[in-house]
Image (cartoon, helix red, strand yellow):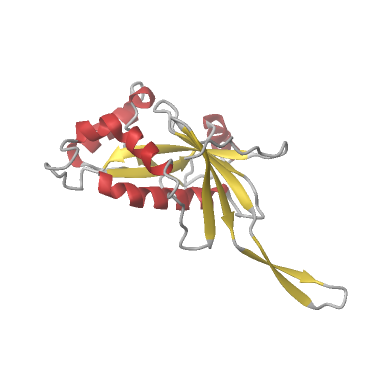
Amino acid sequence: MSQKLPPEAGKMTSFQVFRDQLVIDKAIQLDIEGKYSTPEQIRAVKNDIFQELISNEKFHFHSSKSEITSELMYSDANLSYFKVGVKRNLKNISKGFSEDAKESSPNIIVVINNEPNVQKIAIQTNTNAFKSSNIVSHFNEETIDRKLKSKKLSFFVEPMFDKQEFWNMVEKYQKRIKKVTFDLISPNRPEVSKNLTVDLNLKQLYEDTGTLKTELELGTNEGKGI
């Protein structure tokens, strides 16, 4: 592909950061005659497989809910910059109260950092294009996950959060929280999970059963709160 410079964002632009994870889908039968015949072989090159997919100029994001377009603006060994636009019909009301519909295509920048020790996605905030960055993360996840299935990989995207913000919320609503539910992805990054007991248990569950995602629910007795 022709060399391009990363697109520049405006000075007032903000981004929401998400963490992505590539997990080998053990539910999919490996082809012993294929390029990779064991989970270990796939694990060793999973980031290379992912980068090869998203750095291809023919790669585009797709959404079942909006008419979007996307273009790869820049890519190197680990960083990929995309512009993602969405079709919007805007109504302009004149002084005579007549409506004039105009087509618009507001866009955002999506940056994917595929460095194995990073694996993050930064999504530009622009409510004229998408009401929330979560909408973008969802169709990013759906598009990439679908295209990686043939490679025996599953792709997950989760928003990052400040743990202090979580505990501040717990303290603010003390005794009024009845239930907390966590969706936990089986860890596939040793630098993240090596010191976390819950991640080690999830990793063992994944090794034993192939479970990719686990729901953990913490609740209280009726009438009591956390």
Residue 35 sits in quarter: top left
Q: Is residue 41 visible?
A: yes
**Rendered residue at 87%/78% (across/down):** 96
Check the image and report above or below for 52 versus 196: below
Asked whether 147 or 179 is in front, the reply is: 147
Q: Is residue 34 left or right of residue 139?
A: left
The residue sitting at the right extreme is: 95
Left or right: residue 131 versus residue 191 is right
**How far across and down, in percent of the image, does residue 28 sit?**
20, 48
Q: How many marks?
A: 0
Residue 117: x and y in percent read 41, 25
* Residue 57 picture location, percent across and down: 45, 46
Image point 43% across, 28% down: which residue? Answer: 115
Between 17 and 63, the one nearer to me in the picture: 63
31 vs 74, nearest the viewer: 74
In percent of width and height, residue 225 lies at 49, 43
Residue located at (32% from left, 44% from top): 154
Q: Is residue 218 visible?
A: no
